Image (tube, rainbow, N blue to C red):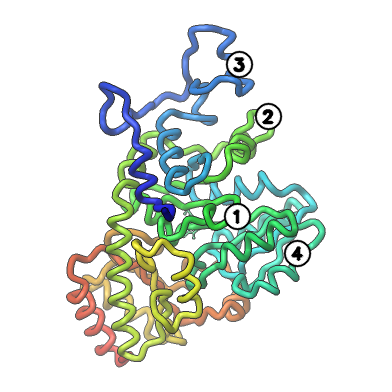
Amino acid sequence: MKFDPAIALQNSMNLSPYDGVNPSISDSATFAFSKADVMTDTFEGKTEGCFLYSRHWNPTNHVLANALAAMEGTEAGWVTSSGMAAITSSILQICNSGDHIVTAMTTYGGTYAFFQNYLPKFNIGVSFVNITDLEAVEKAIQSNTKLIYTETVTNPLLQISDIPALATIAKKHRLKLMVDNTFSPMIFTPCRLGADIVVYSLTKFINGKNDCVAGAICSTEEFINSLIDVNNGTAMLLGPVLDPIKAAGIHKNLFTLHIRLEKHSKNAMFLAGKFLENGLKVIYPGLENHPGHNLMKKLMNVQFGFGGMIALDFNTTDKVGELMVAMQEKGVGYLAVSLGYFKTLFCHSGSSTSSEVPEDIQKEMGMSKGLIRYSVGLDPDIELTWNKIETCLRDLDLI
Ligand SMILES: *Cc1c(COP(=O)(O)O)cnc(C)c1O
């Protein structure tokens, strides 16, 4: 039977007698030992199920990390204080000074800035490529390359990464393949497709409530243990830990993710169809005209749909600001960055979530100045929402 992340997650619930149905929150920074030698052994990583200090492991964070690992079909996971913490800790664990990374050109703005502006401090080189051009990916690999980095569904252009093909290239050159799956949890299971490490911003679809910032890393036990090694683990030493109280909240929200995703996807598919019918330039991987549509169909877990993200390209910035304000006033959703919320969010990528990317690079990526990114919400009647958007578009002569 094909791996189903929602079923794997559901099966991962384990309850010991007399427990609450939600795991108790362990709001302790440190943990007491009844025997001194057990503490010594725990420091040396020799004890199973013992907790030392919450920068290393906390029981509540452990529950969330295990649930995420179950959903990804990986041996282990670790949760972080933000998506950027998950990304940067994992990269700094793999790469040393003098190493090199091949990355997708279209990534989240923060990730792009980390590659472009921050890693040079450590003499780590980065080549930016069009990740859908597998020849270009392989050509960019150097003798000191350690890592291929991509997003399953890239931000904001919604290109689809061919994870199995990238994994083949990575294996051939003995590199690690790291994938940011923030836009498409459950829809894609990157490590089952050949990726070595999957990273998340839990802030988005997985938590889905916009009430906290958090991240996660799922991979082999070996990699996760290396990250939290007390002597040289990047996560242990830089210390981007998640607050266990927030971890408990995210854990509860995780178990409704599959239902939310189906609705996000259904609503987005409906709106994408309407945009297309009205002659707008719409980018949505669920549409047959999307260059990654067939690849996505081949690699995805179909039951969760094509995701909640749509890009709408108006070419120029002329009326984009007015349109977004009009949509907010009509109650379509909020003019705000971020995604995966129950209300629709929209923003102008060039001046917000991708503003770290220089204009000439935005152009090279194929990102026009007039690109609006929608994170479609859980609207109970998406036709009503469409009617509001249609009115705004007509009022501004955009359709
Ligand atoms: C938001 C986001 C991040 C960063 O996550 P934070 O939780 O804000 O640190 C990374 N990658 C993608 C694709 C994102 O959308």
Residue 75 in sight here: yes
Query: Which of the two residues, 373 or 191, is positioned nearer the viewer here?
Result: 191
Q: Which residue is mark 4?
A: 141
Please tell me whether mark 3 or mark 2 is closer to you in this view.
3
Q: Secondary structure at mark 4?
A: loop
Where does residue 37 sit, x and y in percent of width and height? 59, 9
For the C terminus, the image quarter is bottom left
Whether label 3 lies within 8 Å of ligand 1 gets the answer no
Whether label 4 lies within 8 Å of ligand 1 gets the answer no
Q: For marks 1 and 4, give the CA distance.
A: 15 Å
For the residues bearing labels 4 and 3, Cβ distance under 8 angstroms: no
Give the mark, 3 or 2, whose residue is nearer the N terminus: 3
Q: For marks 3 and 2, give the CA distance.
A: 15 Å
Q: Residues within 10 Å of mark 3 (few under 14, many from 20)?
A: few
Give the mark, 1 or 2, whose residue is nearer the N terminus: 1
Residue 308 in sight here: no
Task: Indicate the amino acid at tag 4.
Answer: Ile
Query: Which of the 4 image quarters holds residue 281?
Result: bottom left
Q: Which residue is mark 2?
A: 231
Q: For marks 1 and 2, give the CA distance.
A: 24 Å
Identify the residue shown where x is 33% and y is 78%: 272
Q: Secondary structure at mark 2?
A: loop
Q: Which residue is mark 1?
A: 178
Q: Residues within 10 Å of mark 2 (few under 14, many from 20)?
A: few
Residue that sits furthest to the right in the current view: 143
Q: Secondary structure at mark 3?
A: helix
Task: Indicate the amino acid at tag 3.
Answer: Asp
Residue 191 as seen in the image, left or right of residue 98 = left
